[in-house]
Image (cartoon, grey):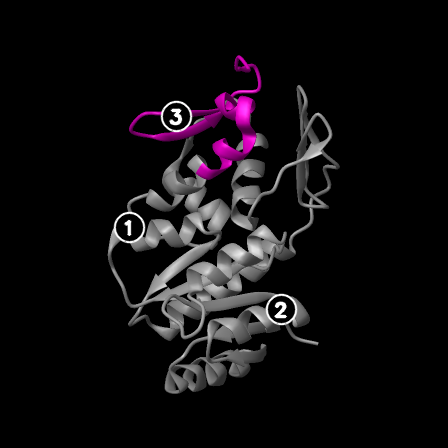
Amino acid sequence: MGKTVLIVEDEQAIVEILKYNLQKEGYETLEALDGETGLQLAREQDPDLMLLDLMLPKMSGFDVCSTLRSEGSAIPILMLTAREEEADKVLGLESGADDYIVKPFSMRELMARVGAVLKRNGKKSTVLSYQYKELEIRPDSRTASISGKELILAPKEFDLLLELAKNPGTVMRRDKLLQDVWGYSYCGDGRTVDTHVKSVRDRLGPYRSMIQTVWGVGYKFDPDAVIR
């Protein structure tokens, strides 16, 4: 059985185009024309990926995304938006979306991103866990905990934390993190990485100092950082 993509978009014409191209690539699809239906289908069907429009009837894409994440859902979410304001993009990422793509977009780019996200989330690690002081990161179960208390992380937040923790002491450039974590060559200013780093630090609480900023370059994971 192929991977299932849930399309949550209120413009029927766009739904049909997305459905046609996804099915042509071998994906199965589910469709919803409003946020409430999309949320219900995500809960009931547990798709492999969600394409989620920002502006929807009944319930916005922001609210659908944040609700799923608050419920512990790890469904990868690619947010579709016709709005180009920086604040909207950041809000989408902060609500738990893995990435966003601005309309109008090329179908080739969208399919590349869909494939990259699914490939990335399908990878398994041979390492059972990474342990730094009381912080433990377990790749196979995609969970992280501090002193045994599990952290609530969105999928890309976990991927970013894992990528940094796998390379302790190494300065990771933003463009390298975009390629390794998001799985494709990303044309952007690095704000996607910065926003996710901020969210991960918030989740880590007193362990936030383990992710250090290297100004003008990127970030590094310091397992010997002072915990406050």
First of labels 2, 3 by sequence position: 2
Q: Which mark is residue 87?
A: 1
The answer to whether any part of residue 20 appears in the image is yes
Query: Which class describes the residues within 10 Å of circle 3: few (<14), some (14-19), or many (20+)?
Result: some
Does 162 appear in magenta?
Answer: no
Residue 214's quadrant in the figure?
Answer: top left
| Quadrant housing the N terminus | bottom right
| Tag in front: 3 or 1 | 1
Q: Nearer the viewer, residue 226 or 215?
A: 226
Asked which quadrant contains residue 142, the reply is top right
Mark 1 and mark 2 lie on one chain; the one further toward the N terminus is 2
Q: Is residue 185 visible?
A: no
Q: Is residue 207 located in the magenta-colored stretch of the structure? A: yes
- Look at mark 3 in the image and give the residue it sits on: 213
Quadrant in the rendering for residue 176: top left
- Determine the residue positioned at 56% across, 50% down: 155
Q: Which residue is mark 2?
A: 47
- Specify whether 138 is left or right of 173: right
Q: Which residues are magenta?
A: 199-228
> Which residue is drawn at the image coordinates 56% and 72% (left, top)?
5
N-terminal of the pair, mark 3 or mark 1, is 1
Kind of element beneath mark 1: helix
**Does residue 128 appear left or right of residue 151 in this picture?**
right
Foreground pick, 147 / 168: 147
Tell me, for residue 185, which label it has, or none: none
- Check contact, mark 2 vs mark 3: CB within 8 A: no
Question: What type is the residue that disc 1 sits on?
Answer: Ala
Depth check, front residue: 213 or 124: 213
The reply to whether discs 3 and 1 touch (Cβ–Cβ < 8 Å) is no
